[in-house]
Image (cartoon, rainbow, N blue to C red):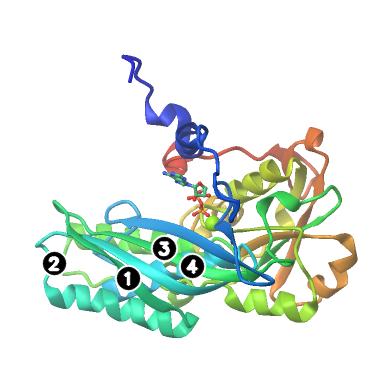
Amino acid sequence: MSDKRTELEQLGEFGLIDQLTKKFETKNPETLFGIGDDAAVLEGKEDKVRLVSTDMLLEGIHFNLMYMPLKHLGYKAVSVNVSDLCAMNGKAEQITVSLAVSNRFPVEALEELYEGIRAACEHYKVDLIGGDTTSSVSGLILSISVIGTASKKDVVYRSGAKENDLLVVSGDLGGAYMGLQVLEREKEVFKANPNIQPDLDGHDYILQRQLKPEARVDVIDILKELEVVPTSMIDISDGLASEVLHLCKASGVGCHVYDEKLPIDAATSTTALDFNINPNTAAMNGGEDYELLFTIGQSDYEKVASNPNFTVIGHITHQNDGMYLIDRNGAAVELKAQGWNHFNKED
Ligand code: ADP
Ligand code: MG
């Protein structure tokens, strides 16, 4: 190590991963794809590949136990991992769970957490096969790894988008972020006066989007039924803008996303407007929707556009054309790379 000191924020999350991993080469022929997608892809049995992915959740960074019930946290932690395998057009089969806890937590609290993990294991039909348990100074840290499979010919990477492909998203966007805004607001009200009960009425949908997200395993089944294999895919964990950029960079292409096409639920829009947030901003930059963003060839347009689960939001262009969000008047705004704490910086 030299005396040089580079601040983490200079590199950002993805620059840091790049910097730390660039000297590594894969040595095993079974490693088909390592770093740089939603999951690693390993040689599997016959016509299958194995998928592996891992995600870590930290108290105070990814969740706040003031409003996140431990059972929901357990469920969500599994969902976000399963979602990464969906993004490869694959299915989750096993998980390992690693936990760091302080003595702040009684056994009963951790049992609650595991109730949520168990509910998710039932729902997604995955097996808990191991993990690790250790102590932490204060907060709770939860790290889950997921293992699964995809058929070799149908595995989908971030890197396959081609010029003129269509950009598609499942479900609707921005709900999880608006759910978080409501929870944060009520937390502040409660902190100011603990006698006031939180007012969460009428926000069921967006609260559920934030507190109990579901991985879109159903989308993988629907695509199979429609006989559509996306040319590229990623799950939407950090907001649409960030994921579109990942997909375009990995594929070496540009894109046009049309803001009037963004699928936004009425509950999300209403709450966004109450908070003086443009609903499109919630959809583009709010995270944690865990929907899927993918590209398809033009020939699959009819099959996908006629399905209520999907919305075509734009198309892929030549790399030199750049990556743009186009508004109703045809004005183009360049999609910006976002890194750590992008919300703090942007807002
Ligand atoms: P996702 O948002 O889908 O969970 P990430 O953005 O966390 O994916 O990670 C992008 C890629 O970088 C993945 O292939 C992941 O495995 C890899 N990665 C992330 N952090 C590290 C690390 N500290 N060391 C090695 N690889 C990493
Ligand atoms: Mg992902």
The tag earlier along the polypeptide, 3 or 2, is 2
Up/down of 262 relative to 281, above or below = below
The tag earlier along the polypeptide, 2 or 4, is 2
Do the residues under discs 1 and 2 have CB atoms within 8 angstroms?
no
The tag earlier along the polypeptide, 1 or 4, is 1
Which amino acid type is shown beneath numbered disc 4?
Answer: Ile
Within 10 Å of the Cα at label 4, are there few (<14), some (14-19), or many (20+) other Cα atoms? many
Q: Which residue position is annotated with label 4? A: 147
Q: Which residue position is annotated with label 1? A: 130
- Quarter placement of the N terminus: top left
For marks 1 and 3, give the CA distance.
10 Å
Do the residues under discs 3 and 2 have CB atoms within 8 angstroms?
no
Up/down of 48 relative to 12, above or below = below
- Where, by quadrant of the figure, is residue 51 drawn? bottom right
The tag earlier along the polypeptide, 1 or 3, is 1
For marks 4 and 3, give the CA distance.
7 Å
